[in-house]
Image: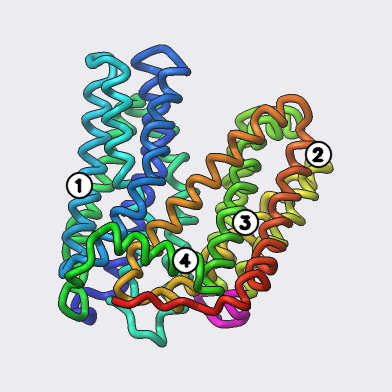
Amino acid sequence: MAKRYGVRCCLAGAALARVGDEMAGPALLLAGLTITGSAVDASWLLAGITVSAAVGGPLLGAFLDRAARPGRLLAGALALYGTGLAVVLVGLGRLPLALTVSIAVLAGLFGPALSGGWTAQLPRVVASEGLPRANALDAMTFNLASLLGPALAGGLAQLLGAPGAVVVAVVLIGLATPMAWRLPPAPGPAPGGASVVADLTAGIRCITRTRPLARATLTSVISCAAQGMLVACAPLLGERVLGGAGHGAMLLSCTAVSALATNAVLARRPGVLAPDTLVRCGALVQAAALLLAATVHPALVVAAAFIAGAGEGPQLTALFAVRHREAPEHLRGQIFTTGASLKITGFAAGAAVAGPVATGSLRAALLTAAGVAMGAAVAGGWSDGHLRGGGAVTPTP
C-alpha cells in the first residue's frame, strides 16, 4: 500500500493543503475588510479561525491515533475545514458577525490537520531509512506555503476580488482531500479500551516526560514566539527602515526563501547534524538574526531576514525528526497535532506582545525577540537537565 501510494503523492497533498491554508488567513482578512468595511471585524474572523487550533490539535490527534484508516479521518477534517471557510465567506455581510466568527472558530478546530496531522502519517508511506529526507521535504512544503500563500492571496484578491481568493484557497484544500483519503491504513488493529481522555493524558505525559521530545517541543514553541514577534515587527521595519510598509512582506518572503533553500540542502544531505542539536542551533541562528535586525540598518535588516530563514527551516526539519523518533506509534498523531497547536499558540502570543512594544520602540521589540529566541535554546538545555533524573516515559498502549 505504501509503495502504491508513494511519498510524492503524500507531499503533493500536504503542499496543496498548506498553500491553501496560508492563503486562507490573509484572503479571509481581506474579504472581511472588503465586505464589512471594518478592520476590527476582519481581525475577529482571522483570530477566530486561529485560536481554536489549540483545542482542536490534541483532540484531532487522539482520534487520528485511534483510527484504523487515519487518512479518511484526515480527509474529513480537511473537508470540514474547507467547508467552514466557504460558509464563513457566504455568511459575511449576511449573518450576524458573532455567528460568522463562531463558524470560523469551529472551522479552526480542524486546522491542525493541515500541519501535524499530515506529517504524522509520513512513516506509513516511506521506509525508515528514507524518513530523514522525507522530513526535510515535508518541512519544505511549509516553507513553500508560507512563501506562496500570502502572495497568491494578495495577487488573486487584486484579480478576482478578495472573496475569489478565499474560494481558490478552499479549492486547493479540496484538491488535497482525496490524497489524504488514500493514505495507507494503520499498521495494526485500531487501539481500543482506553477513553479519548486517557489517550490525551498519555499524549501529554509522553510530550512532557520523554526528555528529547520535551526539550525539542519547548525550544520550538519559544522559537515560534520569537518568530511571531518578527512578523509583528515586519511592517514597521518596512515602513521605518526600507521605505514602505509593504516592504515588510518582502522581508518575510526572504525568510521563507532562505528556509526553503536550506531545507533543500538538508534533503540532499540528511543527518549532517543530530536533530536534537539542530533544533537548538536553529534557535541560536534566529537569535543572531534578530540581533542583526535590531541594528535597523537597511542592508543588515535584509541579511537578517535571510539568516532567520536559515535557522527556521532546519529547525522545523529537525523537530519532525525528533517527533518521529520519540513518538510511540499509538500516540504519533496526537504528538504532532498537539505540537502544532502549541507552536501556533506561541506564535500568536509573541505577535501579541511585540505589537505594542514595537509601536513604542522597534529596536526594543527586536532585542526582546532576540532574547526570546536565545531563551529557546537555553530552555532546551534547562529542560534536559531538569528532566534528567526522571527518565523517559513510554506510555502503555
The residue identified by callout 3 is 309
Question: Under tag 1, what secondary structure?
Answer: helix
Distance from Cα at disc 1 to Cα at disc 2? 44 Å
Residue 167, position in %: x, y?
26, 34
The residue identified by callout 4 is 207
The amino acid marked with disc number 4 is Ile
Ranked by sequence position, the earlier of labels 3 and 1 is 1
Q: Residue at x 24, y 50 (%)?
A: 78
Q: Nearer the viewer, mark 4 or mark 3?
A: 4
Distance from Cα at disc 4 to Cα at disc 2? 38 Å
CB atoms at circles 3 and 1 under 8 Å apart?
A: no
The amino acid marked with disc number 1 is Ala
Q: Residue furthest bottom?
A: 129
Viewed as shown, does residue 397 lie left or right of 22? left
The residue identified by callout 2 is 296
Tell me if I can see residue 281 in this picture: no
The residue identified by callout 1 is 79
CB atoms at circles 1 and 2 under 8 Å apart?
A: no
Ranked by sequence position, the earlier of labels 3 and 2 is 2
Residue 33, position in %: x, y?
41, 19
Residue 16, position in %: x, y?
32, 53
Ranked by sequence position, the earlier of labels 4 and 3 is 4
Ranked by sequence position, the earlier of labels 1 and 2 is 1
